Image (tube, rainbow, N blue to C red):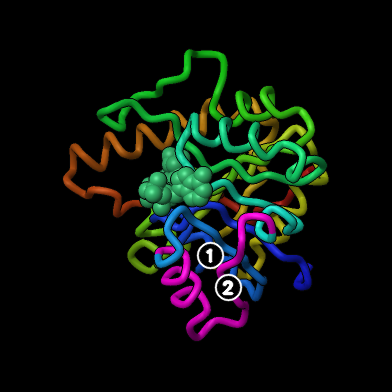
Amino acid sequence: MSEQTIGIVGAGGMGRGIARRLTTAGRSVLITDNKDDAAARVAQEASQGRPGTAHTASLEDVLSSDMVVLALWYPGTVDFATQHATALSGKIVIDIANPLSDTFTRLTVPPGTSAAEELARAVPGITVVKAFNTVPAPTLFDGTVGGTGLDTFVASDDDNAKKEVIALLDGSGLRALDAGSLDNAQLLERLCAFGIELGQRYQLGFNFGIKYLPATELTSSS
Ligand SMILES: NC(=O)c1ccc[n+]([C@@H]2O[C@H](COP(=O)([O-])OP(=O)(O)OC[C@H]3O[C@@H](n4cnc5c(N)ncnc54)[C@H](OP(=O)(O)O)[C@@H]3O)[C@@H](O)[C@H]2O)c1
């Protein structure tokens, strides 16, 4: 696992946080962005004092990575993956998008679907895994809220891909939970919008986390 390279497209708030979590876990990250300086800043910051490495790379090299994270907005995720369907074909593509309304508290996709399912439908040659979307960028970068480690919910219709992503995050500071099939992205995307609504009401901004608190130690049935 440690030899795998993870490509990140987009060096905004989430690309920054994901790169940091992955280098914390000792992974090798390649990152690209529309703006070379943004990607360079994120790569440099993510590598600092971490066991893993992060480098900027051409889009072509990023898309050649073992897995690719689309740290982009929806429906840009779908446009991007459609445009690069050949390069992404056969790969695990991690979708982090929340299709948020102007207020950030509602969704722009109709009930019964999600940004992740729309991506999977538009580009059938990729394996879509939903992850990271309920973790706001600032707390994702920090890895904790008030000293408590954060959860990420990992959903996919491909069990092996889901296991790979969960294993990828081992040591990242995030606890990755198996969140079932990809249609649970409908819930996860709505959950993030709800978290933002609470954050607005209680004037937290994006400084919050959503955590599952088990009464006993978690054991997986799968
Ligand atoms: N921010 C959060 O707290 C949060 C939390 C959970 C999930 N998410 C989700 O994460 C995704 C990214 O959010 P973000 O806050 O990281 O957005 P962001 O700060 O706007 O970052 C996106 C970055 O991707 C770049 N980009 C856009 N199209 C590109 C392309 N084709 N190739 C390379 N780079 C490209 C953008 O550059 P330009 O600005 O030049 O277009 C920007 O630097 C969204 O889907 C959002 O719903 C965000």
Asked if marks 2 and 1 touch (Cβ < 8 Å), the reply is yes
Q: Amino acid at mark 2?
A: Ala
Residue 65: x and y, percent? 73, 59
Which residue in the protein does label 2 denote?
Answer: 54
Q: Residue at x 39, y 55 (%)?
A: 13
- Answer above or below: position of 192 versus 142: above
- Answer above or below: position of 220 versus 109: below
Q: Is the CB of mark 2 within 8 Å of ligand 1?
A: no
**Could you give the CA–CA distance between mark 2 and mark 1, rounded to whole angstroms?**
7 Å
**Label 2, residues with CA under 10 Å away: few <14, some 14-19, many ≥20:** many
Q: Amino acid at mark 1?
A: Ala
Q: Residue at x 66, y 71 (%)?
A: 27
Which numbered disc flags the more N-terminal residue, 2 or 1? Answer: 1
Q: Is residue 210 visible?
A: no
- Element on which disc 2 rests: strand
Q: Which image quarter holds the N terminus?
A: bottom right
Q: Say if the magenta span includes residue 82.
A: no
Q: Residue at x 50, y 72 (%)?
A: 43
Which residue in the protein does label 1 denote?
Answer: 19
Which stretch appears magenta? Answer: 38-60
